[in-house]
Amino acid sequence: MICHQCPDQHDSLEEETMNVYSPPTLLQLARQKLLREEALAISALKDLPKELLPEMFEEAFTDKCTKTLSAMIPMWPFPCLPVGTLIKNPNLETLKAVLEGLDILLAPKVRSSRCKLRVLNLRNEHHEFWRIWAGSHEDECLPQLTQKQPVENSPDCGVKKHLQVTTDFALMKGRLDESATYLLQWAEQRKDSIHLCCRKLQIQSLSKDTFIEIFKIIDANCMQELELSCIWEEELPFLNPYLRQMKNLLTLKLGDITEVTMDGDDLFDEKKRRKLISQLFSFYCLQNLYVDGTFTEGNMIECLRYLKKPLETLCLQYCFLSQTDLDYLPHCLNICKLKHLSLSYTYLFNLFLEPLGILLERVRDTLQTLELQLCGLTDRHFSVLLPALSQCSHLTKINLYENTISLPVLKQLLYHTAKLSQLTQEQYPAPQECYDNTRGVETHRLENVCTELLAILRAKRQPERVAFATSRCIKCRGFLVYDLETQRCFFQH
């Protein structure tokens, strides 16, 4: 597609807003005064009502009041302290202050009677931090724990220690950042009293020495998500003993697992490759599998066959699938209960999609999201999938962007999806009739057609979020979108 309205520069729109002054409350003024005078704040901590501490901690964290942070940790009156939700940009000095507070807490005969802290959460994840003091989330992090109870760190590890520190590690280009390196060294020195729990490990290019150091300290049973990319096949035998320790792994993400070749000949024979694949996919609790560009024609069957239980999520992007691979999908027991299926950016143009239609029929009672963006689908493919698609009554999201479809077939598609009452997000390709002979988009034609298409959905239900998008512009990589909210075309990257 060539966008005739392709902008050379993006003009920023400045909106004037009225600033309404709202005077600070007495509590805010009190916190600000305390934080300006750190010595006074520290001396007052033991007498402050616990309702004041969460917001005071956030302000101290934001303003990098390191002495106050260290002093607040041993006084924390809640079971969990989700620091990670406050971290916008990792700061080593702030992390050191928090860990120094834990050192004070761990010191003999120093523990305050009001301290209930059992878990320090350093993960950058959403958490209802400010509702802790209200009591509704006081036991969310670690239920049924009292001050004298040791932390039981995972269902199978059998390790009980004084405190748990939960985090994620990212090994990028073979290295950890300085904050992660410091945390790892700190935890190693206190391994008798601190349980370092890594929930997510991201590896982009493997450094064996750093990897070994990480697994000397963390408990692999705690690992729930593993992401591997830029890994050579010859490195998999090194990884496999560690992978077998991840008995509670829920999510596996694979990208760019590269075959080792020399003069075009694969150095790994087929028997050895199958053994490696079987070890890579033999996780007993795996629920979510994301594969980006790793599957080559013919080996997807081997991968799915080695799964130990049915998946909830299967995402195959930029993969090369053969007709044999696709034929196997509806017969694979490990994907018969899928909630989320994505084949986006996997080219399906040359394949017969009847097996995919059968798979959709088999998961019709569980499937919630379906993503087939830029798969090379045409009218004949959509016609095959329509009967099965209309049976997926639990679908909440469907994405069919950047495929080729005519207006009559798109209307048929909408007559089917209009029956799916649970849909809340719908993304459809613009019909071919909206392009001119040079593949430019006729904007007015697109707007008129989309108004007509929305009427098909409105005749059956009240749609929530619906959008129609053109193919990408070959010059600027953007595309035109018409959505339900604005009911006009706008340019989007």
Image: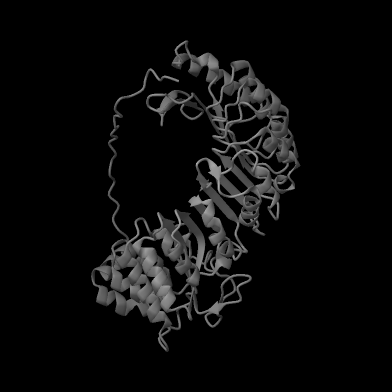
Q: Is residue 46 above or below residue 155?
A: below
Q: How is the image coloured?
A: one colour
Q: Quadrant of the N terminus?
A: top left
Q: Residue at x 29, y 35 (%)?
A: 15
Count how many numbered circles sit on residues in the image: 0
Residue 183 in the image, given as x and y percentages of width and height: 40, 69
Of all residues, the one furthest to the top in this rendering is 437
Of all residues, the one furthest to the bottom in this rendering is 109
Q: Is residue 384 found left or right of 36 in the rendered image?
A: right
Q: Residue at x 45, y 57 (%)?
A: 206
Q: Residue at x 73, y 42 (%)?
A: 365
Residue 109: tell me if it is visible. Answer: yes
Residue 312: tell me if it is visible. Answer: no
Residue 126 in the image, given as x and y percentages of width and height: 47, 56
Depth check, front residue: 7 or 439: 439
Of all residues, the one furthest to the left in this rendering is 37
Depth check, front residue: 102 or 196: 196
Q: Is residue 360 above or below residue 150?
A: above
Q: Is residue 330 above or below residue 159?
A: above
Residue 462 in the image, given as x and y percentages of width and height: 61, 31
Of all residues, the one furthest to the front in this rendering is 263
Depth check, front residue: 435 or 65: 435
Residue 351 in the image, given as x and y percentages of width and height: 65, 28
Q: Quadrant of the C terminus?
A: top left
Q: Is residue 266 above or below residue 134?
A: above
Q: Is residue 224 found left or right of 16 in the rendered image?
A: right
Q: Quadrant of residue 5?
A: top left
